[in-house]
Amino acid sequence: LFEAAIFDLDGVIVDTAKFHYQAWKRLAEELGFAFSEIENEQLKGVSRMDSLELLLRAGGITNLTRGQKEILASRKNEWYKEYLTTLTPADVLPGVARFLHHLRSSGIKTAIASASKNAPLILDKVNIGPLFDVVVDGNSIVKAKPDPEVFLQAARLLDAAPSACYVFEDAEAGVEGAIRAGMRVVGIGAEQLLARAHLTVTSFEQLEPVFLLSRIGVSDP
Ligand code: G6P
Ligand code: MG
């Protein structure tokens, strides 16, 4: 049975993954090293402080104090928020709004499960909040993806069994977290990066909503 659809935010609903990358790259350059888009894949879906740890490791920087790390993370976040000021409803990714409307009119409950503390700001700017029954974000969770906490909390608030939930994710850490939560996962992005997802599409636009729903129905255990 398919009762609920749980969506990651950055890179799934809104085209903000590029802004995260721009800001991390800027920080790396300021620290004196280059940071590639491939290296950035590991940061997707991961909390701000965990992302910083991965970035510093990539640059071979060790021995920073907690305080210094907090300063770097907030500098990255200031740049990121600067990039977000340009965000408009046009940055909702192709096919997303139509898919959400389709789910809701089919009686499927919808949630956001994001690691981001900026989620409320983003949802507000692109004006898509009302299409979700529940929002769980970085402000209300303790353990970051690949821990399943964010997905389990969304399912609990939706009153849906994990096995009746589908998760839509663009990050390896998110796919892993959803699997650990006992949910089915649709990867949004490159198949080789999201190899563990049950199904991968390059965008919502690639699929007719009805087709996706029937695929989901057919693949139910
Ligand atoms: C999402 C993004 C990550 C980001 C994390 C925390 O999961 O995919 O790239 O690091 O949220 O976001 P925040 O806006 O709180 O820094
Ligand atoms: Mg994401």
Image (cartoon, grey):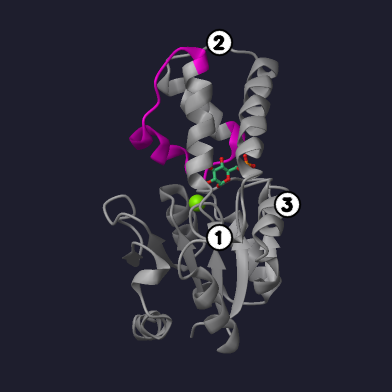
Say which label, 2 or 1, has the lower sequence index.
Answer: 2
Under circle 1, the secondary element is helix
- Answer with the quarter of the image where residue 209 lies: bottom left
Q: Nearer the viewer, mark 2 or mark 1?
A: 1
User: In the rendered structure, which amino acid carries the disc numbered 3?
Assistant: Ser
Q: On screen, 144 above or below 77?
A: below
User: In the rendered structure, which amino acid carries the disc numbered 2?
Assistant: Asn
Under circle 3, the secondary element is loop
x, y percent for residue 13: 53, 61
Name the residue that disc number 3 marks: 140
What residue is drawn where x is 62% and y is 31%? 79
Q: Which residues are magenta?
A: 30-49
- Answer with the quarter of the image where residue 219 lies: bottom left
Say which label, 2 or 3, has the lower sequence index.
Answer: 2
Q: Is residue 163 left or right of residue 202?
A: right
x, y percent for residue 36: 36, 30
Under circle 2, the secondary element is loop
Q: Which mark is residue 65?
A: none
Estimate how packed mark 3 is, as few (under 14), some (14 to 19) or many (20 or more) residues with alpha carbons within 10 Å: some
What residue is drawn where x is 69% and y is 62%? 135
Q: Nearer the viewer, residue 157 or 190?
A: 190
Say which label, 3 or 1, has the lower sequence index.
Answer: 1
The alpha-carbon separation of the residues under discs 2 and 3 comes to 30 Å
x, y percent for residue 7: 54, 64
Name the residue that disc number 2 marks: 63
Name the residue that disc number 1 marks: 90
